[in-house]
Image (cartoon, rainbow, N blue to C red):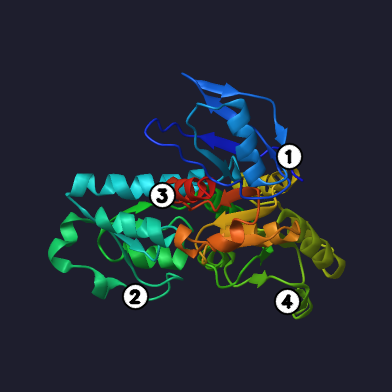
């Protein structure tokens, strides 16, 4: 038993509406209406019908509607991080209220629903997911002078940056400052002769872009097997992580790496927003959540990791992009549900999910 369930009372003075208590053996809060809302002590209820009979005895005349609702705990960190919000603001400002066409080299952020909204504002995604192919053929040459190219929040490699600049469009850099900081660390150490090792997903645009700053002395590892497969590296090594790594996983990988390459300088480059979100997942479990809903794009690295972390709590996890993907018949089995979301998930998607859960 989790404790008291939330009770919603809706007055209807035209007819008497009653709803059976949904679950046996719960503590109920009996609410009645006179001119306002009157709360009376909780009653032990063995059956919904018995509850209604008790209500008739205590309040023979009032008209009320009783509905037990799900308790939803929303993570404080759910929603846009600073870097994503900044990128959207940059791209939106560049449209000048619809006067200019804005292009993004690949998705500006990893959320399909938000990208669709941005498209409606004149912000067009061109190119590919990894920002590797040529995009000049996708640019309308007739409106080129009145167009702006925005560099994605995940950042791009120096080579890609030069290519984009060569297209002759005005451009704005929407790279997340935290990613830019990692690029600066890699570049600085590369100039000092260090070999750079990035812990992360080799196919993620952020990692692809960061690797470009290592020059010819850069590697990406994700697992112990990747480390074992590396050639012998001589000289100093600088290790950084993708900004959305698990803190514990990064520590484990870096410790294992240093056993083979002791001359390694490990730098914590996991962004603060990622750490906060990972901490909040644990907090949801501590606050009594019986299941956790994670909202965000399936290509969003930080959202996928939140779902993995939610699974690690031992609670059922539902990773969805929108409310349409949520199995309502399954989720309504739980009295208390935690909700969190990735750094690129807009509030309107989170609000929609929370509202629907609270109505169950």
**Going by the image, does 144 lie left or right of 124?**
left
Q: How many marks?
A: 4
In 3D space, how far apart are the residues under numbered discs 1 and 4 (Cα atoms)? 48 Å
In 3D space, how far apart are the residues under numbered discs 2 and 1 (Cα atoms)? 59 Å
Q: Secondary structure at mark 4?
A: helix
In 3D space, how far apart are the residues under numbered discs 3 and 1 (Cα atoms)? 43 Å
Characterize the local packing of mark 3: few (<14), some (14-19) or many (20 or more) Cα atoms within 10 angstroms. Answer: many
Q: Residue furthest right?
A: 259
Choose between 169 and 86: the one closer to the eye. Answer: 86
Q: Earlier in the sequence, mark 2 or mark 4?
A: 2
On residue 226, which mark appears?
4
Choose between 153 and 216: the one closer to the eye. Answer: 153
48 vs 160: above or below: above
List the residue tagged with mark 3: 87
Q: Position of residue 325 (x, y in %)?
A: 49, 64
For the point 47% across and 58% down, the residue is: 323
List the residue tagged with mark 2: 134
Nearer the observer: mark 3 or 1; the answer is 1
Q: Position of residue 3 (x, y in %)?
A: 73, 39
In 3D space, how far apart are the residues under numbered discs 3 and 4 (Cα atoms)? 33 Å
Nearer the observer: mark 3 or 4; the answer is 3
């Amino acid at each position: 038993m989790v404790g008291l369930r939330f009770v919603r009372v809706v007055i209807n003075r035209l007819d008497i509406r009653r709803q059976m208590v949904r679950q046996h053996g719960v503590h109920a809060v009996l609410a009645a209406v006179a001119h306002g809302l009157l709360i009376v002590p909780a009653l032990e209820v063995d059956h919904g019908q018995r509850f209604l009979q008790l209500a008739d005895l205590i309040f023979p005349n009032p008209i009320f509607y009783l509905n037990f609702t799900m308790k939803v705990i929303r993570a404080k960190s759910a929603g846009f991080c600073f870097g994503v919000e900044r990128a959207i603001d940059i791209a939106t400002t560049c449209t000048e209220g619809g006067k200019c066409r804005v292009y993004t080299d690949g998705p500006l952020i990893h959320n399909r629903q938000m990208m669709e909204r941005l498209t409606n504002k004149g912000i067009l995604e061109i190119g590919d997911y990894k920002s590797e192919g040529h995009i000049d053929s996708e640019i309308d040459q007739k409106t080129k002078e009145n167009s702006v190219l925005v560099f994605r929040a995940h950042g791009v490699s120096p080579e890609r940056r030069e290519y984009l600049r060569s297209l002759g469009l005005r451009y704005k850099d929407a790279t997340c400052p935290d990613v830019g900081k990692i690029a600066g660390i890699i570049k600085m150490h590369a100039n000092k002769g260090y070999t750079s090792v990035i812990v992360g997903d080799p196919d993620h645009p952020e990692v692809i872009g960061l690797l470009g700053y290592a020059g010819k002395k850069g590697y990406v590892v994700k697992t112990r097997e990747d480390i074992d497969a590396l050639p012998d590296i001589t000289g100093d090594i600088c290790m950084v992580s993708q900004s959305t790594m698990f803190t514990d996983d990064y520590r484990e990988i870096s410790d294992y790496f240093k056993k083979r390459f002791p001359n390694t300088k490990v730098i914590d480059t996991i962004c603060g927003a990622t750490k906060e979100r990972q901490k909040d997942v644990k907090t949801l479990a501590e606050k009594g959540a019986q299941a956790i809903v994670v909202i965000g794009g399936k290509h969003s690295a930080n959202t996928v990791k939140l779902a993995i972390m939610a699974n690690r709590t031992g609670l059922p996890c539902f990773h969805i992009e929108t409310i349409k993907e949520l199995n309502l018949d399954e989720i309504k089995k739980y009295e208390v549900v935690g909700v969190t979301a990735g750094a690129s998930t807009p509030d309107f998607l989170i609000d929609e999910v929370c509202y629907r859960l609270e109505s169950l």
